[in-house]
Image (cartoon, grey):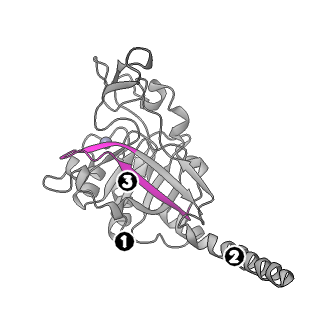
Amino acid sequence: MKIRTLVTSMVLALTLLLFAQQRQPQSSPFAAVHAVVDLTHTLNAQVPTFALSQEPLYQATTVATIDKNTYFARNISLPEHFGTHIDAPAHFARGLWTVDQIPPERLIAPLVVLDVSANAKNHADYQISVADIARWEQANGQIPPGAVVMARTGWDARWNSVTDFRNADAKGVMHFPGYSLDAAKFLVEGRAIFGLGIDTLSIDYGPSPDFPVHHYTLAHSVYQVENVANLDRVPAHGAIAVVAPMKLEGGSGSPVRIFALLQ
Ligand SMILES: [Zn+2]
């Protein structure tokens, strides 16, 4: 009798163990994610900015300390378009989504990384072309609808120097790579992307006087992310981008935290 009980218990234990092992991969939707890469630069007063300002644009003031108040807290002040950030369609297109209105299902999307760093290396004013996209598709297949496309120009390596990142000439005109209008049109109309990103200060290349890519892309309700970090650490395709801006009511944009989920 005792042996029967023992055998029954062992069978039960073994069944539970096997069941648990079988169930485990399905129990978490993130079981397929084997790494997370942070595509965000850290926010501080040294962040390079598109416009120069006499006043410090970023301020963090300590308002409570553990010694004095038993807790630590700061007040912060910074522009909506600062560091790694998102441009909501309302940034250039009146009446379109403000940052709080971008549907969340557009902010979690397949990540496509266009590596144009070889082209941009000796050509600061490089504009990403339709041919660059065609090359990517020859190697990786067609860009899926609803993707977030991010260009890796290599500019990330300059982040710790405001002078090198802005790369302004004697007249104050900046020189850094961006998208050509044709490339943006192809991605928005031909590939139905949700978001367009880059590792420089702007989707439009540095010397652009009138920001045609901003006007076009945002008018088509496609959001933009700028100053993206660490694109050298993610594959050309296969990752999922999680683009998480602050939900600022009526905001034109926001600093954003971007994660790449590697599967
Ligand atoms: Zn912006």
Q: Earlier in the sequence, mark 2 or mark 1?
A: 2
Q: Earlier in the sequence, mark 1 or mark 3?
A: 3
Disc 3 crowd rating (10 Å Cα; few below 14, some 14-19, many 20+) is: some
Foreground label between 1 and 3? 1
Residue 185 on the magenta span? no
> Badge 3 is on which residue?
180
C-alpha span from label 3 to label 2 = 58 Å
Residue depicted at x 53% and y 69%: 137
Please state the extent of the stretch shown in magenta in the rendering: 237-256
The amino acid type found where label 3 is placed reads: Ser
The amino acid type found where label 2 is placed reads: Leu
SS category of the residue bearing label 1: helix
Residue 254 on the magenta span? yes
Residue 167 image-quadrant placement:
top left
Residue depicted at x 42% and y 65%: 147
Left or right: 119 as drawn, with respect to 224: right
Residue depicted at x 54% and y 57%: 261
